[in-house]
Image (cartoon, helix red, strand yellow):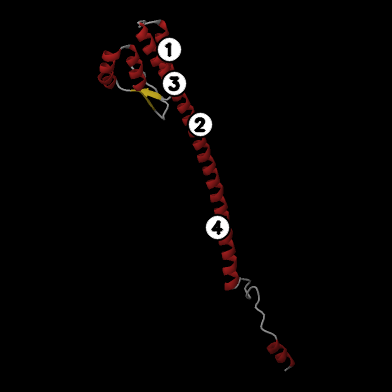
Amino acid sequence: MASESSATSSPPQRSTSDASGEMTRQQLYSFQHAQWTEARETELQELKAKLKAAHKSWSSEQELYHERHDYLEEKKRKAMKAGKKAAKLAKKESEEGKEGTGKISNLLRRVSTSLGGSSGCRSRSNSESRATDAAPLARTGTGASIASRLRSFSFSSRGDANKDK
């Protein structure tokens, strides 16, 4: 009887494994849950690393895009400023009767060079250019040709440039 009373006074102890050495159902569940949790945590860390790398790549691409855009805007602004200067000079010379001097040709060549090349500007097609440039050229002479030539260039974000032929 003494052994019976000690058995009833303490709760029965579950062994970690049954007689054949296998884990109990609860232990198996806990073990599988721990493995699943660890795998999800590892997967989450990998995804976070990939997201961070993708964001860094995207950020650097955005920075390069904005730098290129700022560069092209500055180049366009300088070209427009040079074009306005050329138009003023042409107007002044036409008033003085000095049309066709070397100053205008050199200035116009500099403006064309700054607008052309790999600057990111592209010109209109030849048919557009002929249709819109003919009337101003006929009306006011050299000043209009410079102004119309400047208008024939438009800003392109790609950086491709095609000169008028």
Q: Amino acid at mark 3?
A: Lys
- Residue at the spot 58% in from the left edge and 72% down from the top edge: 26
Q: Residue under circle 1? A: 107
x, y percent for residue 155: 39, 27
Q: Residue under circle 4? A: 40
- Residue at the spot 42% in from the left edge and 8% down from the top edge: 103
Disc 4 to disc 1, how far (Cα)? 68 Å
Q: Residue under circle 2? A: 67
Q: Is there CB contact under 8 Å for labels 4 and 1?
A: no
- Residue at the spot 35% in from the left edge and 14% down from the top edge: 143
Q: Secondary structure at mark 1?
A: helix
Foreground: disc 4 or disc 1? 1
Q: Earlier in the sequence, mark 4 or mark 3?
A: 4
**In the picture, which quadrant includes the C terminus?**
top left
Q: Amino acid at mark 1?
A: Leu
Of residues 19 and 145, which is closer to you in this image?
A: 145
Q: Amino acid at mark 2?
A: Glu
Seen in the picture, residue 23 relative to 108 is either above or below; the reply is: below
Q: Residue under circle 3? A: 81
Q: Does 61 sit left or right of 11 as displayed?
A: left
Residue at the farthest front position: 95
Q: Is there CB contact under 8 Å for labels 2 and 3?
A: no
